[in-house]
Image (spheres, grey):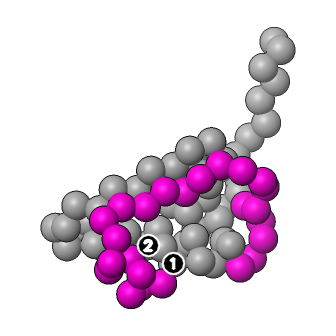
Amino acid sequence: LRDMLGSINGLLFPGGGDMLHWEPYVSASQFVFDTVLEINKAGTFFPLWATCLGFEQLPLLVTHNDTTILTTFNASR
C-alpha cells in the first residue's frame, strides 16, 4: 500500500456499502489514513477526499476506531 500511495497524488474514500466494521477494510483504511497524514506533515500536499460513508469513516480513523464518539440522531424531531 505504501508503494501505491507513492505513485498517486490523492486519495478517495468512497461511499457505498457498510464496511466500517469489517476488519480488513478498517486496518487498510487506518494504514492509508495514517500514511496520508505522514505525507502531508512532511510537506507534500496529498489530498484525501471522503464521500458519504467514507466521510463517516473519517472520525473513526482519527480516533483509531473509537465508536463512542458516534451518537444516534433522530432527524424527525
Determine the secondary structure under disc 1: helix
Residue furthest to the bottom in view is 3
Q: Residue 23 versus residue 47: which sits nearer the camera?
A: 47
Query: For residue 36, what is the image quadrant?
Result: bottom left
Mark 1 neighbour density, 10 Å: few (under 14) some (14–19) many (20 or more)? some
**The C terminus, quarter of image:** top right
User: Measuring 74% from the left and 40% from the top, which residue is drawn there?
Assistant: 71
Q: What's the distance in space between the residues labelled 1 and 2, CA to CA?
A: 5 Å
Tag 2: Cα neighbours inside 10 Å, few (<14), some, or many (≥20)?
Answer: some
Q: Position of residue 44 (x, y in %)?
A: 19, 67
| SS label for mark 2 | helix
Type of secondary structure dominating the magenta stretch: loop
Q: Position of residue 65 (x, y in %)?
A: 65, 65
* Residue 41 shown left or right of residue 4 in the figure: left
Circle 1 is placed at which residue position?
31
For badge 1, the amino acid type reads Phe
Can residue 9 be found in the magenta stretch?
A: yes
**Residue drawn where x is 66% and y is 62% of the image:** 66
Is residue 22 placed above or below 54 in the rendered structure? Answer: below
Q: Is residue 43 visible?
A: yes
Residue at 55% over, 57% down: 13
Residue holding disc 2? 34
Q: Nearer the viewer, residue 1 or 62?
A: 1
User: Is residue 37 visible in this depiction of the protein?
Assistant: no
Q: Which residues are magenta?
A: 1-24
